[in-house]
Image (cartoon, rainbow, N blue to C red):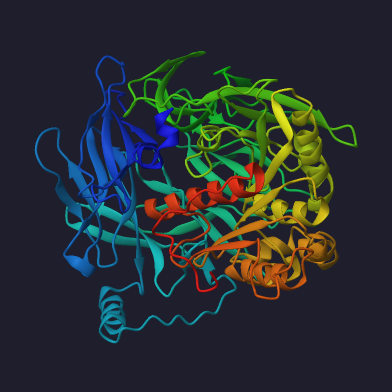
Amino acid sequence: MGTFTDLAEYLALPRTNALTVSPDGKRLVAAVSELTKDGAEYAGTLWEIDPTGAEPARRLTDPARPASSPTFDGTRLLFVRKHGDGDDAVPAIWELPAAGEPVLRAQAPGGLSNPIARGGVVLAVGPRFAEDDATDGRIREARKTGKVSAILHSAAVVRYWDTDLGPAIPWLYRIDDDGANPLAPLPFGGFIEPHPSLSPDGSFVVVEDGAARGTAVRARLVRVDTTTGDALPIVDDEAFEAHAPAVSPDGARIAYLRESISTPESAPTVTLWVHDLATGEDTQWAEQWDRWPGAPVWLPDGDAVHLAADDNGHAPVFRVDTERATELTGDDAAYSSLQITNGGTAFALRSSYLTPSHPVRIDGGTVVDLPPVAAHPDPPGTLTELTSTGPDGARTRSWLVLPVGADADHPAPLLLWVHGGPLGSWNTWQWRWNPWLLAARGYAVLLPDPALSTGYGQNFIQRGWGRWGGPVFTDLIAAVDAAEEREDIDETRTAAMGGSFGGYMANWIAGHTDRFDAIVSHAGLWELPGFGTTTDAPFYWRTEMTPAMAEANSPHHAVTDIRTPMLVIHGDKDYRVPISEALTLWTQLLADSGLPAAPDGSTEHRFLYFPDENHWILKPGNVTVWYETVFAFLSEHVLGESRELPEALAPGPDA
């Protein structure tokens, strides 16, 4: 329990992010994030995992020299690490021998990342200003010496999440014995993630590529020759986007995810398709399966793929073939980073609300835990499921985290925590949004999957499409009602919280009910008509809501009805939900809400602002401040108890 009562101890836990396996299955390597010695940031490290489970995990690299993106070139382990001095250091491709120090494999002026290897061919991605080296070098030097940061845009997308796009654009590089050789550009400045998949013989690679659609961009699949760089679109249709390509073991087919272009009236669908390179035909697999598939990984015989998919509050591994999807794992967990060897052995990361991500081997229908990088912390409470029914008769399921000692004689205060997305699900361990940190402080935490959540079928998503303030809101309130009927829940002490879309719902809840004692809104949408033109992907917004829908679902119209103290949290580097949303909310809360600032300027509301963070709060020190501020705010308004803020959070100018 100490892990969750002591934030420093919690933040120091290593976090396993991804796996890679050698083709022969003899080596399994995990990419891990670890806290640096000074505690200022997380650094990537690589760990060796024994595929048989006989030996403990062992560290391969030191966090003092961060490493990431491991991949195998046959039996040789490649990874990314910076090369160079000071500000001139850029990511490069390194090789880690079985014994000895890492060896530099390839570098490029703008850096290299995301290596992949197959058939003796190694590719990576790196930014370039121009195709020829001389022009690229001149532009790079001119911007460096002139300290120029300006970017002149001619396309709609100018930034993405927390990154300003351009003027350099990503290129595919081929890593040969003579170094890194530019192969082909990837348009749209990195807005479309390439997700490259090499053919078994390494002769071609299939990437996601951006195609213009008016002022919008959609993802298509392009085949690139790894010798000439010649590119040919192979899956390209105005009606859908194509994602997550995977070349089949015989090199003849491409499995991929097809996402329909949504409209304000129709939610997107995600389905699994296979493209035949010889005939150009596309075939949907498991056509009757009513779930959204994740990225496919081929089985060696080419008759089926493995993938993970959200399903009723979990994310199992499924075997999918032309006719059906068959669940393999059958437990209350979520799986990611699926890997399959040439011999057919499957590995993955497994997590749930009881354990963080850790490596496992999947033998048929049996899941075998492999030695983790660190021991799993013991949760300070219990986990149960709860079902509720909304006004329209739809069923909503939730996870309910209960603190130690909660019972009829000692009911726990309730915190409603709304997930982001909104197309997502509460089904896996969360480092950023961890309910056990609240449970360790005595709160019961309700994690519902309301309308728009994935894992419950297309109709469940469609119920809330374009109606964020409708079925989503009533599903959440029904879930709270069901939780409050329990004897171990104190219905007189409650709060609501959420981030991103969850922050939007926190804002909506604040203006549409007074039942909660406190509201925490992180990176929440507030004024929807304005948001649609300031977010980093405004063309997506146009496929989600009409102007009339945005007006009808905008929380700012109910500001005068907000009578609940609100803690507003936002990072200035958030391009997905721009800081303008929080600034507008904050100004209107103090001036126009039903709980306005007093004549002397004092207020029960609070605004926690992070100038150097994005949509998520990632720096360990800032994470500590985030949680301690949330704890203090909830303690004051839900428990009626005063709690000290961290010393680093100096009083603001209005204190």
Quarter placement of the N terminus: top left
Which image quarter: residue 181?
bottom left
Which image quarter: residue 398?
top right
Q: Is residue 563 left or right of residue 283?
A: right
Q: Position of residue 308 (x, y in %)?
A: 56, 31
Which residue is more in the foreground, 521 or 69?
A: 521
Q: Residue at x 20, y 43 (%)?
A: 62
One can see residue 239 in this view: no
Which residue is more in the foreground, 116 or 166?
A: 166
Vertical placement of residue 449 versus 380, above or below: below
Q: Position of residue 639 (x, y in %)?
A: 63, 42
Q: Residue at x 29, y 66 (%)?
A: 110
Q: Position of residue 503 (x, y in %)?
A: 65, 53
State the count of labels. Answer: 0
Q: Is residue 611 left or right of residue 393?
A: left
One can see residue 644 in this view: yes
Vertical placement of residue 452 versus 412, above or below: below
Query: Hey, which residue is sitting farthest left in the picture?
Result: 100
Query: Hey, which residue is sitting farthest right in the picture?
Result: 392
Vertical placement of residue 203 versus 291, above or below: below
Query: Hey, which residue is sitting farthest bottom in the picture?
Result: 146
Q: Position of residue 346 (x, y in %)?
A: 43, 23
Q: Residue at x 27, y 23 (%)?
A: 26
